[in-house]
Amino acid sequence: MPRIIAIANRKGGVGKTTTAVNVATAMAAVGKKVLIIDLDPQSNASTSLGIDKNNCQISSYNLIMGESSISKSVVWTEVPNLSIIPSSPDLAGAEVELANKQHREYALKKAIQTTASSYDYILIDCPPSLSLITINALVAADAVVVPLQCEYLALEGISDLIKNLNIIKRHFNPKLELQGVVLTMYDGRNNLSQMVEDDVRNFFGKKVYQTVIPRNVRVSEAPSHGKPVLLYDHKCQGSQAYISLTGEILKREGERLAC
């Protein structure tokens, strides 16, 4: 079975999608077979990989509702070894449709277990809320990567997120672990970024990746061209940071297997 990593944070605009897309791209570049599941109704991960959501007849909505399998839902990207199950606006209604189903928290896990054995990694791009869709992602996942924007208000929600992760671990998914916290939108000229970094490292210790993702205009531009920043501008600071972050993530995965 593949290793399943959810990219999650209850706060929007912290870099979840950018992290999911570029870590997946970097993993694929070193030969890993990677699948992104876009679970955000805004479909930003799909758009960032050049996928037109309006031309996709099957989406992650059909997957989570049990209407399609992974093999029938995937769309291959221009990145070798990287495919995606795109999102659609219909996913916003899945909350209501799942509410009355038995074992509704396990819908995504069931779909993945049935047909996903050919992948090395599955990265799930979660919506910015603790919705039933996000709960499905966390129940299906082996680990969570939390992007954290280097601003004060971003700190307020992370303790609640950790509480939520512990609740899901206790009631639904005992193997769930925090793989790490990645600091995003870091501005070295800003004292606030350094203060946030110090607070997060003091609280989470070694769970915080050494790599920080800088504010970088090329990272912001890349989605409008339908490309990961690693393809849009391989040499920019943002690309180099995501390559470094992916190295840390894979190193932690290797250390886990060695234990």
Image (cartoon, rainbow, N blue to C red):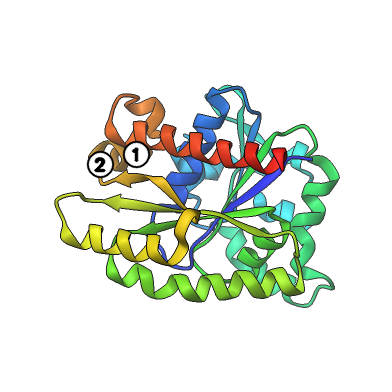
Question: Would residue 225 be seen by someone viewing this image from the given angle?
Answer: no
Give the labeled residue for mark 1.
224
In what quadrant of the picture does the C terminus appear? Answer: top right
Numbered mark located on residue 216 in the image = 2
Residue type, mark 2 in image? Asn
- The secondary structure type at the circle numbered 2 is loop
* Picture residue at 29% right of the left edge, 38% below the top: 221
Which residue occupies 32% across, 39% down?
219
In the rendered image, which quarter is residue 94 located in?
bottom right
Image side of residue 73 versus residue 198, left or right? right
The first of marks 1 and 2 along the sequence is 2
The percent position of residue 152, horizontal first and vertical second, equals 28, 70
Task: Give x and y (percent) for residue 255.
Answer: 63, 40
Q: Nearer the viewer, residue 237 or 15?
A: 237
Quarter that holds the N terminus: top right
From the image, state whether disc 1 or disc 2 is nearer to you: 2
Question: x and y percent of residue 78 in the render?
Answer: 52, 24
